[in-house]
Amino acid sequence: MKNCPHCGSPQRDEAVECRSCGRSFISPPPAIPAPPQILLVSRLWLWLSAWLVAAIVMLIDAHVYWRSAWQFPFFSPAGFVTALILHPKVVGGPHWSLTVTIGWIYYVLLSLLAFAVPRYRVFFWLFAALCMSLILNCLLWLIALYLVMHR
C-alpha cells in the first residue's frame, strides 16, 4: 500500500490516481525549455559591425572608388549568379544595373530575415551567410579593383 502524496489517504500500489481526492500519481512531463533568443539590439549591432568591416575593407585600396560603392553587391552570391546567367560582357552594360540591383535585394532580404528571427540558432546561420557573402564580396571587389587599376 502507498499513501497519496496530496491528501495522505492509503492507496493500492497499482493505483494511478487517488480515490479520495482524484489527483494523479503520474507526474506531468517536464516542460520543454524555449529556444534561446537573441535581442534585437544585439542583432542590430552584429549587422552594423559586419557592414562596417566590409566598408573598411573597401577603403583599404579603394578610397578613390567610393563613388562606385553602390555597385558593391555586384559580387554578392545573387549578383554573381545573375551576372553568370545574363553575361554582362562590359562593365556598365545593359545588364550591369540589374545585376547590382539583384545583389542589393539579396543583402536587404538577408538582413530583414536576420532581424525578423529572434531564435539564436536561426539568426546565427543567417548572420554567418551574411558575413560569408560580405567576405566573398569584398575579396572579389578588391580583385576587380586591382585588375582595373593595374591594366
Image (spheres, rainbow, N blue to C red):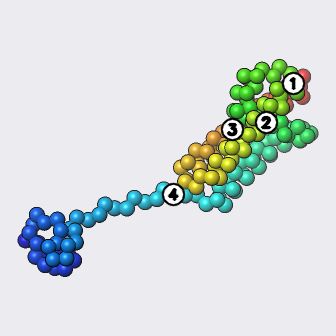
List x then y, in percent, for residue 22: 20, 73
List x then y, in percent, for residue 49: 72, 52
User: Which-is-in-front pick, marks 4 and 2?
Assistant: 2
Query: Marks 4 and 3: CB-CB under 8 Å?
Result: no
Query: In the image, which disc is placed on residue 36?
Result: 4
Circle nearer the N terminus (1, 2): 1
Q: What's the CA distance linking mark 1 and mark 2? A: 14 Å
Query: Marks 1 and 2: CB-CB under 8 Å?
Result: no
Q: Three-letter amino acid code at disc 2?
A: Thr
The residue that mark 3 highlights is 133
- Left or right: residue 125 compared with residue 97: left
Circle nearer the N terminus (4, 3): 4
- Left or right: residue 31 compared with residue 34: left
Residue 91: image quadrant is top right
Query: In the image, which disc is placed on residue 1?
Result: none
Q: Is 135 in front, or is 44?
A: 44
List x then y, in percent, for residue 84: 73, 23
Q: What's the CA distance linking mark 4 and mark 2? A: 35 Å
Q: What's the CA distance linking mark 4 and mark 1? A: 47 Å
At a point 88% along the width and 27% down the height, the residue shown is 92
Q: Secondary structure at mark 4?
A: loop
Q: What's the CA distance linking mark 2 and mark 3? A: 16 Å
Q: Secondary structure at mark 1?
A: loop
Q: Three-letter amino acid code at disc 1?
A: Gly
At a point 77% along the width and 49% down the height, the residue shown is 52
The residue that mark 1 highlights is 93
Q: Three-letter amino acid code at disc 3?
A: Ser
Circle nearer the N terminus (2, 3): 2
Count the marks: 4
